[in-house]
Image (cartoon, helix red, strand yellow):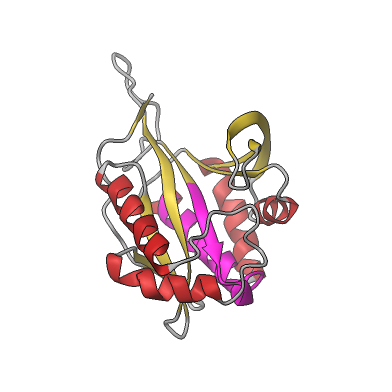
Amino acid sequence: MSASALPLEPVTLSGRHVRLDPLAPDHAQGLFAAASESRATYGLTLVPDSLPSMQRYIDGLLAEHARGESLPFVVREASGAVVGATRYMSIERWSWAPHAAPAPVPAGPDVLEIGGTWYAERVQRTAVNTEAKLLLCTYAFETLGVRRVMWKTDARNERSRRAILRLGARFDGVLRAQRAGFDGVVRDSAYYSMLGSEWPEAKEGLLARL
């Protein structure tokens, strides 16, 4: 298996409650405003706390996209206001040579992660996140044809872990000492995934919640 070197094409994903636009440098001010409303829920999450750091954050994500490592989005609520960010990341395109890839063969990557997600506090636990995940999963499974979507979060973040399970994802386990934690500790990460065969049932659940 190998990481993707071919960037995913930027795309806008729209629903009734939310629109996901390709991240761009001019989103810095809107993202900084969203992050500044309240920082009470960002204890375990990397969310820039100044305009210069937000600009560097965006520059880093756009560089990732150019390398084929992620596809970042800015999240807008129905009014058009910027309320957060999310992205496809951990993008993998598998090599099957000398064997033929088993069907169904993806039109895009074999695997990707939905992550790097944060929202202004006022839209957390609203239809914004539910529909954003519905849009991202629909595009991943039904347009890109990925075999698996994954999520990971700090194992201590019970709120995030419950939210991932509500999407219909399955718990895969905890990888100990997986990375440096945002708060300066060695972080254990809880992993979750959803297969293409599991998506129709999960989609029904997300639509019902909306």
Towards the viewer: 99 or 186: 186
The residue stretch that appears in magenta:
114-140
Residue at coordinates 29% horizontally, 65% vertically from top-left? 24
Q: Is residue 123 magenta?
A: yes
- Do we see residue 76 in this rendering? no
Return the x and y of residue 155 as percentages of the image width and height.
70, 42
Q: Is residue 147 above or below residue 35?
A: above
Q: Quadrant of the N terminus?
A: top left
Residue 78 in picture, x, y percent from top left: 47, 82
Q: Residue furthest bottom?
A: 79
In the image, 164 versus 168, the foreground residue is 164
Q: Is residue 33 left or right of residue 73?
A: right
The quadrant of the rendering that contains the C terminus is bottom right
- Closest to the observer, 30 or 150: 30
Q: Is residue 146 visible?
A: yes
What x and y, as percent, mark residue 89?
Answer: 42, 45
Task: In the rendered view, tell whether residue 48 sits above or below residue 111.
Answer: below
Q: Is residue 170 above or below residue 30?
A: above
Task: Report the label total.
Answer: 0
Image position of 151 with respect to 48: above or below: above
Residue 2 x %, y % = 35, 26
Which SS does the magenta portion mostly show?
helix
Q: Residue at x 44, y 70 (%)?
A: 31
Q: Residue at (52%, 59%) from the top-left corner?
A: 47
